[in-house]
Image (cartoon, rainbow, N blue to C red):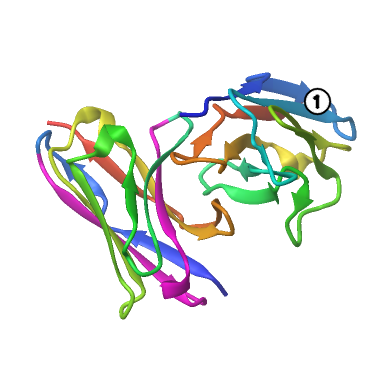
Amino acid sequence: EVQLVESGGGLVQPGGSLRLSCAASGFTFSSHWMHWVRQAPGKGLVWVSHISGDGGTITYADFVKGRFTISRDNAKNTLYLQMSSLRAEDTAVYFCARGIGSGWFDPWGQGTLVTVSS
Amino acid sequence: DIVMTQSPDSLAVSLGERATINCKSSQSLLYNNKNFLAWYQQKPGQPPKLLISWASTRESGVPDRFTGSGSGTDFTLTISSLQAEDVAVYYCQQYYSTPQTFGQGTKVEIK
């Protein structure tokens, strides 16, 4: 069974840092692009970043450029999102998702909540 | 960035009746005879679930009451006979270009 499990969320003060992890199982992790998508409370879905299977291609949404870093460890089947200079507007559930074909997402993890507040 | 706009924001449909959700993109999603559009269903407290890719290709296990249609800039998700378990928020997503972008979501409820 294909499974994605996020961890690392929590409460952090504005300006702080947090690292999210996404443990993958049930598929050949290194063969897939992986994505982070977030959802602010009561709001819609917003793509954050993606990384190619070999880690050689990375793209970020403009609103996280210079603050967030996506990475992966294919030996550990794990995706990461290092978040720094966090702002209140970064408060959201962060989902990891496997990229399929030309760019849709399937499946998604259950998500991990990041709350930025003093 | 491609802007995706869904309509309506919410709709209430009687059990067994048809629900229709529209999705419009700010530029054509058609390339090489394929439309780069997906539909997702998100139930409360759950992650999104892929329903349809390539605008009209239903994923394995998705009931055939869910149908995707449209081309270019205008797309539709139709639930032919609404069931109680279909109560959810539905999102369209374009993957024609990065950043992939989503519609704002359409909440489907029972009337």
Tag 1 subunit: B
Q: x%, y% of residue B57? A: 77, 51
Q: x%, y% of residue A21? A: 29, 61
B26 vs B90: above or below:
above
Q: Looking at the image, which residue is at 60% across and 42% down?
A: B43
Residue type at numbered disc 1: Val
Q: x%, y% of residue A84? A: 14, 44
Q: x%, y% of residue A33? A: 44, 61
Lateral position of residue B100 relative to residue A59, left or right: right
Number of marks in picture: 1
Which residue is label 1 attached to? B13
Start-end of magenta stretch: A16-41
Residue closer to the observer: B60 or A31: A31
Residue A36 located within the stretch drawn in magenta: yes
Q: Looking at the image, which residue is at 34% across and 58% down?
A: A57
Q: Looking at the image, which residue is at 44% across and 39% down?
A: B99
Residue closer to the observer: B23 or B109: B23
Residue closer to the observer: A71 or A15: A71
| Image quadrant where residue A74 sits | bottom left
Residue farthest to the top, as pictured: B8
Instruction: For label 1, count other residues whose C-alpha is less than 10 Å away and answer few (under 14), some (14-19) or many (20+).
Output: some
A41 vs A7: above or below:
above
Residue A31 located within the stretch drawn in magenta: yes
Lateral position of residue A69 relative to residue A76, left or right: left
B86 vs A19: above or below:
above
A96 vs A45: above or below:
below
Residue B25 visible from this viewpoint: yes
Residue farthest to the bottom, as pictured: A75
